[in-house]
Image (cartoon, rainbow, N blue to C red):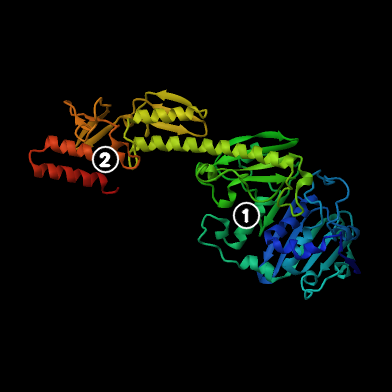
Amino acid sequence: MAESFKSHITVDKNIVSLLSKFTYERSFPYALREVVSNSYDADATTARIDIALDRNRVTIHDNGSGMTREEFDYYLRIAGQRRGKRETPKFGRKRIGQFGVGFLAILPFCELLQITSTTENSEEVFTAEIPAWRFFKHDGQSLDVGTVDVPGEVTRNVKSKAEHFTQITLLKLTDLGKRYFNQKPLTKRKNSVLSWPALDRLKWEMQEDLPLAFPVDSPANEVLPYPEPVGMSVYLQSEQLWRNFSGGEIVDKGELTVEGIKLRYAVVTPWKAVQPYELRGLKMRLNNVGVGPREYFDIEIGRKYSRGQWLSGEVQILNGLDGEVTLSRDAFVVTPEYEAVRDKLASVLRKWADFVETVDVASRDMTKQIRGGKQVRVAPKREIVERNIKALEGRGFTVRRLDQRGEAEPVHVDKAKKEVVVYETHPGLEDTISIRGRKRRIIYTHGSGRITYQNACRVTQDGDLEIDPNYPLFKSKRYGDVFKKFYIFAVLARNESSSRKEMFDFMLSHVEKEFRDF
């Protein structure tokens, strides 16, 4: 037999303003995160989110410790400081929530919030319905939230003793709730989560902030181990969610203590721009939950640190800052200790942005010089290779020099091992040019006199080509190699042609062949 009851929402001072400001400013993913975070604090091992837009409802079900009828009254106490230990009773997790804003955040997105729960070894199951619409549709008049009835009923069933759960259902989604799912993807921002369908965006945003594990095969597990002894699996539309982490190479990891704040971090790069945009920078986590968007901590991304966009990673606060997070848990309160943490993390990102840029520029420069193409410098290949190898050695790379010739490339840079392998006798390191089926060596010399168009390029008695790289046209960063080849064709056309027409044909035919795809 069911027993009816009535509860009321009770508030601390200054909380009423949150009903009109705080909740409306938050997105649906934020509100959903708050509800699932409550499941984590209730020692749930599984939480399932089911979105049924055709039925105009969203359900969150967890197998946590559940609530008694009396505990539900405390659940309705908004912004009441949590009683008892900061660790959960069953698994000893660090609690995420300090204030009862979980259901407050979700109220604007539905007209009715239904809560059903029971605890282990209890025959009682209660169901209550919070009339969310009452808090947001009162014609601008001040509302005493304590006068709003929260009706419910308790049923008793012996079979319920083996169960423990809480189920929260959003019934009759409001326009604010529907708006999230109806918004069209911003196709112009193809590398952003904003270009994804609503459910994909929701999945990504949940994975950014919820206390989830990394996929089992993720290398992140080795450097950022799950901080709690027992975790919680979350499913969205029956698909398990995993913590976001960029693919690529983990270039830095470790633990630091800054002004008494202990943290663990990892920096990763895929050696290209991280996608989507929102995955760039370091994600801060406190008590295993994300705090705010990813950050670069005010370092200059762009012209100064152009490869900063290649960096991603995570920072786990292991000890400290618990009392320095905002009510919404989407930012930290600015304190001297937090500023010191920011400064330290900024120095870490600057170091690795500079490292990634140095390594990438050196690798690209060698490859471009060896393979040829646009904007190749007029200089010996070995000189360019050795200059860049020296830059890589300065970044901790080791160098191995081998005599093998059969490799596809004469220089191989292993960024993961921080190693450069040079195949010394590889023909790709030779400076040559093939014209009319004949391979000619290019010898770079530095003349002692004035350099003119007449002596910038010369043919030796052996048919080799002498190039003076100090000739002004050859020093052009963009077109130096183009001018060099043009001069080579001109000199050979003059030396090997018996008539003006033959010289003209020689010259233009090679120019067309060389630069048709320029």
Residue 41 x, y percent position in the rendering = 79, 50
**Which of the labelled discs sits on residue 204, or is there none?**
1
Q: Residue 401 got which mark?
A: none
Q: Which amino acid does label 1 sit on?
A: Trp
> Which residue type does callout 2 highlight?
Phe
**Circle 1 crowding by C-alpha within 10 Å: few under 14, some 14–19, many from 20:** many
Tell me whether circle 1 and circle 2 mark residues in contact (CB < 8 Å). Answer: no
N-terminal of the pair, mark 1 or mark 2, is 1
Give above or below for 352 relative to 239: above
Residue at 74% in and 66% down:
108
> Is disc 1 placed on a helix, strand or loop?
helix
The answer to whether any part of residue 468 appears in the image is yes
Q: Looking at the picture, how far across and down is residue 105, in whole percent?
A: 75, 61
Give the distance between the C-alpha atoms of the residues marked 1 and 2, in whole angstroms: 51 Å
Specify the label residue 483 is tagged with.
Answer: 2
Q: Nearer the viewer, mark 1 or mark 2?
A: 2
From the viewer's side, name the closer residue of 113 and 138.
Answer: 138
- The residue sitting at the front extreme is 450
Side of 63 relative to 359 (left or right):
right
Residue at screen point 81% across, 43% down: 92
Would residue 501 be found to the left or right of residue 424 on screen?
Answer: left
Residue 233 x/y as whole percent: 71, 50
For label 2, the SS is helix
